[in-house]
Image (cartoon, rainbow, N blue to C red):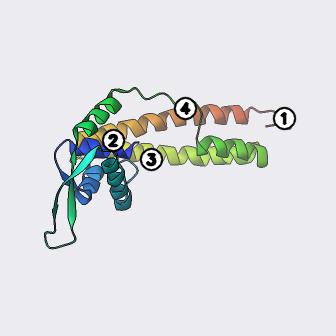
Amino acid sequence: MSAPFVLLGLLTAGPRHGYDLKHAYDRTLPRAKPLGFGQVYATLGRLERDGLVTQSSQDRDGGPDRTAYTLTNDGYVRLTEWLGAVEEPAPHVASALLAKVVVALLAAGPEQALAYLAAQRKAHVARLRELTRTKAEPGATVGDVIAADYAIAHLDADLTWLAATIERVAQQPPGEPS
């Protein structure tokens, strides 16, 4: 996910302080990898440097100085371009899950790989159940539900791959190189 564009998108609602942006991010994308306050402020600094946001006001309000940021016209144009661009499918497989299975086959053999695959399948099923419950919670927002749907689709794909891989590894003749 591109944090700069998410922050630009949040600024379309009007000026916000970094603190407010962090909390808006957490509310809007509750299942996404969290953004730290330092990442928010560093990103705002880069967006300001690039002319995509500008400081609109500062207030103290009984605490530290808070700078509000506003989306510039250039920022809005860049956000619109980003929203209109299709995300290319990843050209390479980059998965710790795949790497662990391959290394388990190479280093420890089929039995260790099957044990890992079974444990991973169990963890995926537990997470799938958790996400399914999340969708049914009374206070679930549309954002919660679509984030859960996205994660469930990826877990389903992983579970399909895990089942196929368990079958392939289990059918591997003894002594055949992995």
**What residue does disc 1 label?**
176
Q: Which residue type does callout 4 highlight?
A: Thr
**What residue does disc 2 label?**
5
Contact between labelled residues 4 and 2, with CB atoms less than 8 Å apart: no
Contact between labelled residues 1 and 3, with CB atoms less than 8 Å apart: no
Residue 13 visible within the image:
yes
Say if 68 sits above or below 162 in the image: below
Q: Report the Cα–Cα distance between label 2 and label 4.
A: 33 Å
Q: Report the Cα–Cα distance between label 1 and label 4.
A: 24 Å
Q: Which residue type does callout 2 highlight?
A: Phe
Q: Residues within 10 Å of mark 1 (few under 14, many from 20)?
A: few
**What residue does disc 3 label?**
127
Describe the element under mark 1 as helix, strand or loop: loop
Describe the element under mark 4 as helix, strand or loop: helix
Q: Is residue 169 left or right of residue 143?
A: right
Choose the circle earlier in sequence order: 2 or 1. 2
Residue 136 visible within the image:
no
Q: Identify the mark at residue 160; answer none if there is no mark.
A: 4
Query: Is 71 or 99 nearer to us in this picture?
Result: 71
Describe the element under mark 3 as helix, strand or loop: helix
Q: Which residue type does callout 3 highlight?
A: Arg
Query: Is 39 or 47 nearer to us in this picture?
Result: 47
Q: Residues within 10 Å of mark 2 (few under 14, many from 20)?
A: some
Q: Farthest right residue? A: 175
Choose the circle earlier in sequence order: 3 or 4. 3
Residue 33's spot in the image, x, y percent? 41, 50
Q: Which residue type does callout 1 highlight?
A: Glu
Q: Report the Cα–Cα distance between label 3 and label 1.
A: 34 Å
